[in-house]
């Protein structure tokens, strides 16, 4: 981990949820926008493994994946210790009922899998604890 690395900006989780993007980075965007918007990654860009064509860009608590020069996924880890590109912002104190209300408003599916609640909408999955704490947000 590059201890000198600092995010160029911070964005609130609710903005990412509502827009399904981090500024101009969204599913289907050319991977050239990653560097334009995010700058140099915290760690060197790497392939997931030797046989894959999927590349991984790590920016603090945000991991962006590309394949064939196109962004294919964005994962946000909200429990980790990495520097926060995406922070909780106004949803920092939300409880499970708040997340369920948002899910109902957006027409998302609610799944309870092994004590993890997943809110699934068009292009997004949010993993919550039973108390309503967000762990991971995936944009696909």
Image (spheres, grey):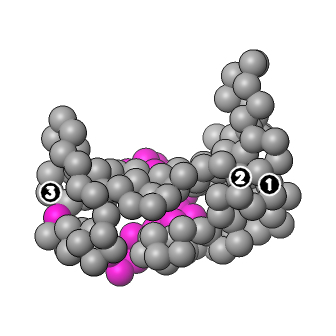
Instruction: Identify residue for label 3.
Output: 131
At which x and y percent is residue 123?
Answer: 49, 58
Residue density around tag 3, few if under 14, some if 14–19, many if 20 or more, within 10 Å: few
At which x and y percent is residue 90?
Answer: 35, 81
Tag of residue 31: 1
Regarding residue 42, the answer to whether it shows in the image is no
**Residue 83 magenta:** yes
- In this rendering, which labeled residue sits more in front, label 2 or label 3? 2
Find numbered disc 2 in the image and state the secondary structure of the residue it sits on.
strand
State whether residue 22 is above or below residue 110.
below
At which x and y percent is residue 115?
Answer: 16, 41
- Number of marks in the image? 3
Mark 1 or mark 2: whose residue is earlier in sequence? 1
State whether residue 15 is above or below residue 112.
below
Regarding residue 139, the answer to whether it shows in the image is yes
Q: Which residues are magenta?
A: 77-96
Find numbered disc 1 in the image and state the secondary structure of the residue it sits on.
loop
Tag of residue 71: 2
Residue occupying the point 85% across, 58% down: 32
Q: Are marks 1 and 2 in contact (CB under 8 Å)?
A: yes
Residue extending furthest toward the top: 51
The reply, left or right, for residue 138 in relation to residue 49 is: left
How far apart are the two marked residues, 2 and 3, measured between alpha carbons? Answer: 32 Å
């Amino acid at each position: 981990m590059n201890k000198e690395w600092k995010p160029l900006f911070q964005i609130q989780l609710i903005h990412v949820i509502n827009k399904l993007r981090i500024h101009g980075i969204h599913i289907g965007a050319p991977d050239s926008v990653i560097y334009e918007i995010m700058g140099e990654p915290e760690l060197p860009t790497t392939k997931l493994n030797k046989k894959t064509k999927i590349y991984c860009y790590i920016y603090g608590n945000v991991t962006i994946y590309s394949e064939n020069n196109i962004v294919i996924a964005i994962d946000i880890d909200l429990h980790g210790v990495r520097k926060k590109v995406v922070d909780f912002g106004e949803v920092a104190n939300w409880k499970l009922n708040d997340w369920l209300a948002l899910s109902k408003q957006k027409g998302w599916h609610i799944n309870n899998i092994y004590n993890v609640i997943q809110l699934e909408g068009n292009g997004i999955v949010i993993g919550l604890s039973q108390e309503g704490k967000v762990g991971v947000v995936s944009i696909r």
